[in-house]
Image (spheres, rainbow, N blue to C red):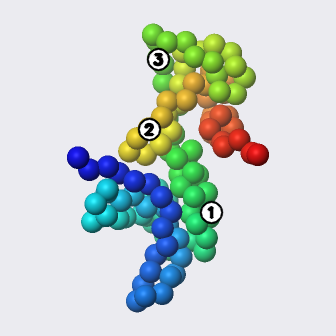
Amino acid sequence: MTMQIYETRQKVVDGKPIGWHMVCSNSSGSRVYPVGYCADHAPHPTAEDAERCYRAWTLDTARFSIESPDEMRRCGVCGDWTLMRAEVGGSFPVLVPLCPTHQDRASLDAATSKPTT
């Protein structure tokens, strides 16, 4: 069984690092390719820039207003009970509970942002 691994990786050409991409690789490492917006442009100066680029792609390509009629969950923004979800992610999407009021990119970003410490 092959696993897909998503991570930032430095692109190296002729032994010299030229920048960073968010990539997907298989668990054997035999296939590595840029994903999201990184697939369409030159590498980023930093790994953090590549992560931000991929996050923007996941939010820009999210699907909204998905109904889950069998399970009420708390909205990831306001905490109201809802049947509605947004789907975010590439090959392994995640359903994020968002009430009808928060079915938008900014709310999805807030509901899925890493907590700051």
Relative depth, front residue between 10 and 76 = 10
Q: Residue at x 40, y 41 (%)?
A: 92
Q: Is the residue 42 above or below the residue 115 in the image?
A: below
Q: Amino acid at mark 3?
A: Ser
The label shown at residue 68 is 3
Callout 3: helix, strand or loop? loop
Q: In x, y percent, where is residue 66? A: 48, 24
Q: Residue at x 40, y 89 (%)?
A: 14
Regarding residue 65, the answer to whether it shows in the image is no
The label shown at residue 93 is 2
In the rendered picture of this protein, how many numbered marks are placed on residues? Answer: 3
Relative depth, front residue between 56 and 24 = 24
Q: Is the residue 70 above or below the residue 84 in the image?
A: above
Callout 1: helix, strand or loop? helix
Q: In x, y percent, where is residue 47? A: 58, 66
Q: Residue at x 68, y 23 (%)?
A: 101
Relative depth, front residue between 12 and 65 = 12
Mark 3 or mark 2, earlier in chain:
3
Q: Which residue is mark 1?
A: 48
Q: Is the residue 81 above or below the residue 103 in the image?
A: above
- Measure the alpha-carbon separation of dots 3 and 2: 15 Å
Q: Amino acid at mark 1?
A: Glu
Q: Amino acid at mark 2?
A: Pro
Q: In x, y percent, where is residue 69? A: 46, 11
Q: Residue at x 57, y 58 (%)?
A: 51
Does the residue at mark 1 contact the one at mark 3 (Cβ under 8 Å)?
no
Q: Image check: 77 left or right of 70?
A: right
The answer to which quarter of the image holds residue 39 is: bottom left
Quick one: which residue is furthest to the right in this view?
117
Q: Image check: 37 left or right of 98?
A: left
The answer to which quarter of the image holds residue 115 is: top right
